Amino acid sequence: MWFSILLPLVLPIIHATTSPSPSFAEKCTSFSLTNHPLSSHPNATLINAEFLPANSTLPPPPNLHPTCLADQLSIPLTVPMCRLSLHIPTSPSSAVNMEIWLPPPETWTKRFLSTGNGGLGGCIQYPDLLHGASLGFATAGHDNGHNPEVLRDFVDRSVVVSTEAGVEITRQFYGYKRGMKRYHSGCSQGGRQGWKAVQEHPGLFDGVVAGAPGLSFNTVIAWHVWVLANVLKGGHEGFLEQEDWEEVTRRVMEMCDADDGVVDGIIEDTRRCRPDLRRFKCRKDGRKKEGQWCLTEAQLETLYEWVYKPWKVDGKVEWPGVTPGAESLWAAIVSMDGWKSLLEESMKYIYQQDPSYNISLATLQDAVNAIRMNPFDLATFGGDLSAFQRRGGKVVHWHGQLDQTLHIANSDRYYDHVSRTMKKSSRELDVFYRYFRISGMQHCFGGPGANAIGQFFGLGASERPEDNVIMALYLRGAKFQADDYTQEVVFSRKHCRYPKRNRYFGAGDGTDEEGRRCIAA
């Protein structure tokens, strides 16, 4: 089945570690662009060529920015590898820094993997490099940024440049001249970058795994800025305290949890959850009885007119609203300084181009302008994927239903947009594009559901060969104790291919994997 070409990215099977011959280490440290010039990017500079033995810990790169999460580097290497670091100018005022990790020839699968970034981060995702290399892929990662030329790198050029250079280096290093499969795997901004390649560079990859993608990214920023300035700031009569948000989520769970046939703390299909919170409205005078929780009219308006309601501009839906069940997670994260900083810096330096801009004073017109500006088509919402399909490309799209930042209904909206644009049914799209909604998963990972689907190092759902045969029907996920992949698996679950939904017909607490069936939505 066609999913077999993408399977190693989703269900990792770690190669047995073998001791490399001394020539591998020597070949690595002696590699140079003088002996192996890049025809695709002749202005590239090789910064470092370093052999890393198995079980070693990655030394931090020089001048690593503190926002790049240096603690990611503490993961020990599971396989020996060759680490090459390059600097590639992309314009007179911008450049891409990239790394490519090359496993020993005896474990290399003759495949190349590009990895993406997260949020507005301009950092190489080292766990993703480790994940790909441990699976036998020649794996590349890159940084990016946000001035006018570097913004273009951020949108898509960094992926194109690092892939072109990475593929050429891989061929030279292994002396491989035959066809080599090329893949991209990423979540959040990395998922959006994967979709950008599918839409605008259809020949770049044979397969793309795009998780929780930041599609309509301009709107992600604009909607959050608009809501934050109007209803999520203290003093607003419709303001909800964090404990109110948590109570809202608890009541929503009570209303929607059992919809799939079992109460297990997971809303299996958020599309079917239509919570009626008006039953908890306070007395007419707005006063609350002692010990009783209720919502004022203004708070209900916040929920139904701002939070849940799809946001329309000129009659067109631009953002679908917050997912029922994710309210308290969303409210907590958008109140964090880091999230506010992301929003403010985006408005200051991308959309308003005014360092003095204050998002607390944002107007509706500011938000609308951000959507319309769309630099270098950052929105990444093109619906015609026919060029990618004609070249035989395959794409796996997945999204956590409990995503607290990039709400899953936006991925639903994109899939439906592709279906309408290409005039194809789900059955017809299945030939090259399949979308999976992961119940109980937060943004990219974590949450009460079976959220480990092989998206990151250590988060492998299964190593069973029989799962290879049934991947065309669902993605298999695992729930680890405390979301720690070194602990035991609590339960596993098969996540259905969109637009189907998961229904429990088994007994007990819902953890019987064979008790679930994918049925029509």
Image (spheres, rainbow, N blue to C red):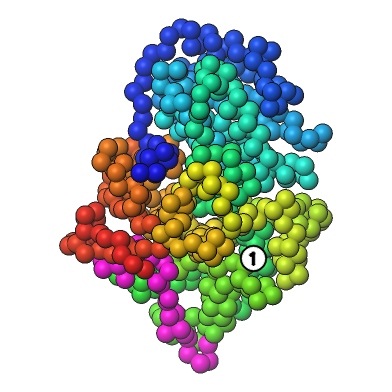
> Magenta part mainly helix, strand or loop?
loop
Camera-side residue of 303 and 211: 211
- List x then y, in percent, for residue 449: 35, 55
Does residue 318 appear to the left or right of 95 in the view shown? left
**Figure check: 478 above or below 83:** below
Q: Quadrant of residue 277?
A: bottom left
Camera-side residue of 258 and 513: 513
- List x then y, in percent, for residue 188: 55, 49
Residue at 34 percent of width and 67 percent of height: 520
Q: Which residues are magenta?
A: 259-286
**In magenta stretch: residue 265:** yes
Q: How many marks?
A: 1
- List x then y, in percent, for residue 119: 60, 48
Does residue 496 appear to the left or right of 125 in the view shown? left
Residue at 68 percent of width and 27 percent of height: 40
**Figure check: 462 above or below 430:** above
Camera-side residue of 272 and 325: 272
Q: Quadrant of the C terminus?
A: bottom left
Identify the residue position indicated by label 1 in the image: 223
**Secondary structure of the residue carrying numbered label 1:** helix
Does residue 137 appear to the left or right of 345 in the view shown? left
Decide if residue 16 is in sight here. yes
Does residue 181 appear to the left or right of 347 in the view shown? left
Amino acid at pointer 1: Trp
- List x then y, in percent, for residue 125: 55, 36
**In magenta stretch: residue 160:** no
**Figure check: 46 above or below 517:** above
